[in-house]
Amino acid sequence: MSEQEHDRLEDGIIKEKSAMPFLEHLEELRWRLIKSVLAVIVCAFVAFNFAHYLVDFVRIPLGDVKLYNIAVTGTFYAYIKLSLITGVLVSLPFVFYQLWSFISPGLYKKERLMVIPLVLISTILFLIGAAFCFKVVLPISFAFLIGFAGEQIENTITIGSYISFVGLLLMAFGFGFQMPLLSYFLAKMGVINANMSGKGRRYAIVIILVVGAIITPPDVFTQFLLAVPLYILYEISIIIVRVTQKKDSE
């Protein structure tokens, strides 16, 4: 028996062993979600103790613009919100591990060995997206949106609205940068191909614009700043799918 045939036989045996009823899959998913949520809560609890420092950090894109609080509990809830966002960011490797581990039983042996690299790549892509948002998108957005008011209007930005705005965009860019990895994974599974992705450009543009309109504030400028990088990532994903298809066919 050749090594390739042996691997296929072993994959078939492992997949047969890993097959489980639908309810058991749901139970496993439930426990992995519980573990992920607990990891976020624990990290958020630790982050809450450093909330003052975190506020100083997230204020960097604002420059000299001050933040205000107009409610008795406003600052407290803003700190909780910021701690939860930080908890998600810090616990990302564990959350991605739970996700890929849940998917891995349905993969072949060589693909299952990619779980740890996939976790690392997912985390790195998320951080790159969040960093791009923090260093490029947020400063441009604030310079435009705050400066748009002119000198005759004084901006009063509450700490709660600011953290919500920053947190939403950081998450949007972080998860948006997962598109190339997701495309590679779907191409390896044979779910999508380059021809399908190419023909889907017009639909992708519509979906990207709709997503941008939903998750960003109601202004065209910020939606544009989100939509352009996402479309570029979509084009990169098409290239990745094409390369993956070519290697698999060799």
Image (cartoon, grey):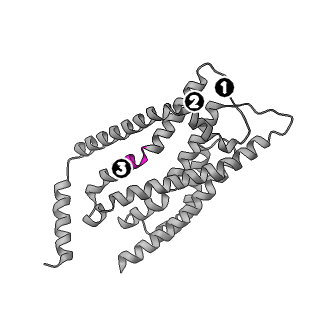
Does residue 97 belong to the magenta stretch?
yes
The earlier-in-sequence mark between 3 and 1 is 1
Q: Residue furthest left?
A: 1
Residue where numbered disc 2 is placed? 78
Q: Secondary structure at mark 1?
A: loop
Would you identify the image quadrant in which residue 182 lies? bottom left
Viewport quadrant of the N terminus: bottom left
Which label number is shown at residue 99? 3
The earlier-in-sequence mark between 3 and 2 is 2
Up/down of 238 relative to 145, above or below? below
Q: Residue furthest bottom?
A: 250
Q: Residues within 10 Å of mark 3 (few under 14, many from 20)?
A: some
Residue where numbered disc 1 is placed? 69
Inspect this view and state whether residue 27 appears.
Answer: yes
Give residue 132's position: percent from left, percent from top: 60, 54
Taking depth in this image into account, of 164 and 250 the one nearest to the observer is 164
